[in-house]
Amino acid sequence: MSFSDALQRHFDTFNQLGQLETESRLLADQIDQCFQQGGKLIFMGNGGSAADSQHLAAEFVVRYKAERSPLAAIALTVDTSILTAHSNDYSYDSVFTRQVQALAKPEDLIIGISTSGNSANVIDAIEAAKKIGSTTWAWTGSHGGKLLNIADHLIRVPSDETARIQEAHIFVGHWLCEEMDRRLTATA
């Protein structure tokens, strides 16, 4: 596979992202409402999706572009003591669930990132968040996996290729940060 071939697959995926505009705008509205109600964003995922969770939580807390107050966001992937203790004492399949049960409130918005839509620990945590009354979103690839029928809302990237899905997830995340910056500085 050549560099040009990979770049073309990236372009092919991104040329279809316009179909996610309605869902992305709804998510932006819900994030805005979450913050207005004193809620927080809770991100989770495995592997590259864990890194994306941490990256996006940092963008909300620190800043994206605009100078603004910090926005409440956390990635459930960053506390190695919780991750390892829970996985050792219970199971990795419920490692995010325990944290959701401890931290989530009804006014929070939970984002589970899973390119396949079938990550057991993300599924379990999304189900736990729904029981709490939090709004749940899953970010997946084109099929949505099991999360298609579990999460309240989905961002389904029109691709089956993990790398392209992850590239699109971070694009959506960056757009959300930019949109929150715009909304907060417009009202300041």
Image: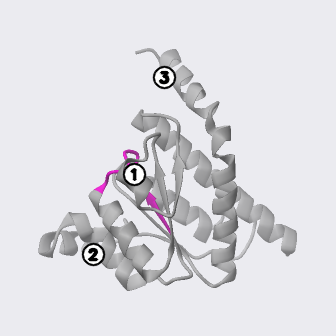
The disc placed on residue 82 is: 2
Q: Which residue is mark 3?
A: 6
| Segment tinted magenta in the rendering | 110-119
* Rendered-image quadrant of the C terminus: bottom right
Name the residue: 32% across, 51% down. Answer: 118
How far apart marks 3 and 1 lie (CA) works out to 21 Å
Q: Is residue 35 above or below residue 179?
A: below
Rendered view: 20 above or below 121: above
Between circles 1 and 2, the one closer to the viewer is 1
Residue ID at (35%, 77%) = 99
Closer to the camera in the image, 69 or 153: 153
Residue located at (40% from left, 67% from top): 126
Give the side of residue 141 with respect to residue 85, left or right: right
Q: Which three-letter amino acid code belongs to the residue tagged 3?
A: Ala
- Residue with the mark numbered 1: 114
**Mark closest to the chain's N terminus, 3 or 2:** 3
Amino acid type, mark 2: Ile
* SS category of the residue bearing label 1: loop
Q: In the rendered image of this protein, does residue 39 appear above or below residue 167?
A: below
Q: Is residue 16 left or right of residue 178?
A: left
Cα separation, mark 1 vs mark 2, equals: 20 Å
Of the residues shown, which amino acid type is indicated by label 1?
A: Ser
